[in-house]
Amino acid sequence: MVESKVLLIEDDPAIVENLSAFLKEEGFEVTSADGQSRALSQIEAKRPDLILLDVTLAQGNGYSTCTAIKARYDIPVIFLTALGDEFSVVTGLDMGADDYISKPFRPRELVSRMRSVLRRAGKSGRAVHVGELKVDMEKGVVTRAGEELFLSALEYRLFLVFLNNRGKILSRGQLLEEIWDVAGEYVNDNTLTVYIKRLRDKIERDPQNPEIIKTVRGLGYRMEA
């Protein structure tokens, strides 16, 4: 299920292609525009929940585009730009931007900032569904048929790692790297085995024959897309 609709206003085709692909993997619906007029048309047609806006555009600039958007719509805007100096940051925020992140940026940091802006704007209430499970990303709650499944902090973190990488095979090394510091101590390979078993016991109808988190022999694990 789509988490939120995002409009990417950027005139570099390579950035549009790569960033759109990454955000779609993270559960976002992404459309793009390369200038102000197309952006306004896309907003009218798609009604996005969030806008990612580059300052430097082939048609106009991000500052004027942000002003035009804010004058007509109540949609949060995050500036994406290589201009990381204080003047550019202040100008962007003065134009009504909700956040500002400089290129090059770490993709997962961007996603975290996007979700933070969406929460502040009250636009992140959409749930994510995985099979019979419903995940409230705002509250950090997993339910099945309205009944909450009580996950520990580390079990929930492990679940989110799979959720954010649906359809991908994750090695044990990748999983360890993602979760080792959540418990405040080193998580070793044996502990990972225990937590995967505990998570399956809670989320799978039949933990002995898992349908949500499957073992890929010799490679790792995969949550079905």
Image (cartoon, helix red, strand yellow):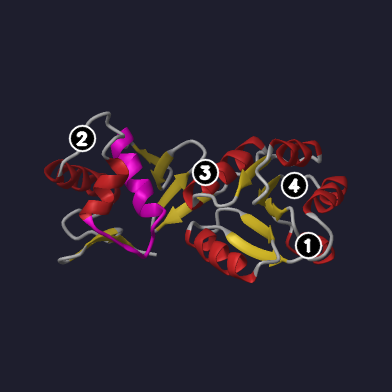
Q: Is residue 27 above or below residue 112?
A: below
Mark 3 or mark 4: whose residue is earlier in sequence: 4
**How far separated are the C-alphas under marks 3 and 2?**
24 Å
Residue 103 in view (yes/no): yes
Count of labels shown?
Answer: 4
Report helix, strand or loop for mark 1: helix
**How far separated are the C-alphas under marks 2 and 4?**
41 Å
Q: Which residue is labeled 4 in the image?
A: 75
Q: Which residue is labeled 1 in the image?
A: 39
**How far separated are the C-alphas under marks 3 and 4?**
18 Å
**How far separated are the C-alphas under marks 3 and 1?**
24 Å
* Residue located 32% across and 45% down the image: 178
Asked which quadrant contains residue 48, the reply is bottom right
* Residue located 56% across and 43% down the image: 115
Report helix, strand or loop for mark 2: loop
Mark 3 neighbour class, 10 Å CA radius: few under 14, some 14 to 19, many 20 or more:
few
**How far separated are the C-alphas under marks 1 and 2?**
47 Å
Mark 2 or mark 4: whose residue is earlier in sequence: 4
Relative horizontal placement of residue 31, taking residue 163 as reference (left or right): right
Q: Which residue is labeled 2 in the image?
A: 186
Q: Which mark is residue 112?
A: 3
Mark 3 or mark 2: whose residue is earlier in sequence: 3
Residue 104 position, x and y percent, is 55, 52
Report helix, strand or loop for mark 3: helix
